[in-house]
Image (cartoon, rainbow, N blue to C red):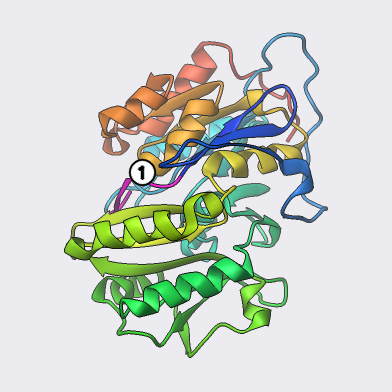
Amino acid sequence: MDEFQLHSAGTDLWPFPPAVFFRRTGHPQPLTRTIALAYTGEMKTGSPSFQPHRSYGAPPVGVVACDLDGTLIGRDHRIHPDDIAAIRRLRDAGVHFAICTGRSIMESHDVLSELQLKGPGVFVTGAVVADMADRQTLHRRTLPAASIARLIDLFSNYGHASLALIDEDASAAPYYVLTSHGPVHPATSEWFVRNRVQARQITQLDGALQRHVVRIGIVVERPETPRIEAELRRHFGTDIYFLSIKAPLFDCHVIEVFHPEVSKWSGIITLCQQLNLPPEAVATIGDDVNDIPMLRQAHISFAMASADEHVKAAAKRTTRSQTQGGVAAAIAQLFDEGRIVSGRHGT
């Protein structure tokens, strides 16, 4: 990622092929739960689709799902020229290139505009699948209202303002609301400035807003982080999925909380449903801990050379670093090995 580094907390999602079901293992206590994704969340129709590839063997790559920070863009927020050319070649071959990021779609605006991407992409760590061209949400997975109220109460007890990301059809774009239970952390202010977004301050989230929260989080100082992480595990267990994100620039942590079924891989499963393609047709590229579910579960996956060793261990392969055009190198491998057949999946 950019100046953020993630470490694992909560749970990952695991596919249970061939049906669209998942086996989910909780943390810290083991727990197995079967979830039918086809019947959960909020799905909207009308997105572009590809013709399914029918084969008794592994299908060729029809989707490349790529992380943003640390993978496609570097600390300077720029894309390597080789990566731009490789993505163009990929799209010319009829393969769908999808952003798969922890950012919201509005925070991904510059990259989407530069690459002129179309069709579904994965945002907010898999909580949202949205069309990359018109920015419309195709699928969202919101936090339960009961969990939101309890989270805000927990965070406010420690003197922290809760930052909620709202995604609703009535608004032209997702937006933030910030509760008034504490001061705005400098890291939060810096993030807003860099991404040109604002937050509306409120005293509490009413019922209408609660129905549209896809992520809620706080910024805490490093010494306080373990205690809040422990409180989240103790009070919520497997009812939520959360990430604790280290922000070295401010020596603090960003704690983000999601619906328990959220991960980048679950977002990719939804994306495949939108495109009418099997998950086996997906290749993934990433560099950090929140990428582990999609790196581990994709039939073909690449970790960046700069990734930590446990992230590399989750991927099937390793590619170059972002500064060396690692995305382009991964795409070149797919072409060289015949994993991409031009025009096979349409455009």
Question: Which residue corresponds to mark 1?
Answer: 8
Q: Which residue is drawn at 25% across and 76% down?
A: 186
Q: Residue at x 82, y 53 (%)?
A: 45
Note whether 96 is above or below 214 in the view shown.
Answer: above
x then y, percent, for residue 268: 61, 40
Q: Nearest the camera: 333 or 193?
A: 193
Q: Is residue 282 magenta?
A: no
Q: Does the magenta stretch include residue 4?
A: yes
- Residue 204 visible from this viewpoint: yes
Q: How many labels does the image show?
A: 1
User: Going by the image, does 25 lie left or right of 281?
Assistant: left
- Residue 319 visible from this viewpoint: no
x then y, percent, for residue 310: 31, 29
Q: Which region is colored magenta?
A: 1-10
> Mainly helix, strand or loop, the magenta region?
loop
User: Going by the image, does 300 lie left or right of 323?
Assistant: right
Instruction: Give the residue type at disc 1.
Output: Ser
**Quarter location, residue 53:** top right
Note whether 237 is above or below 150 in the view shown.
Answer: above
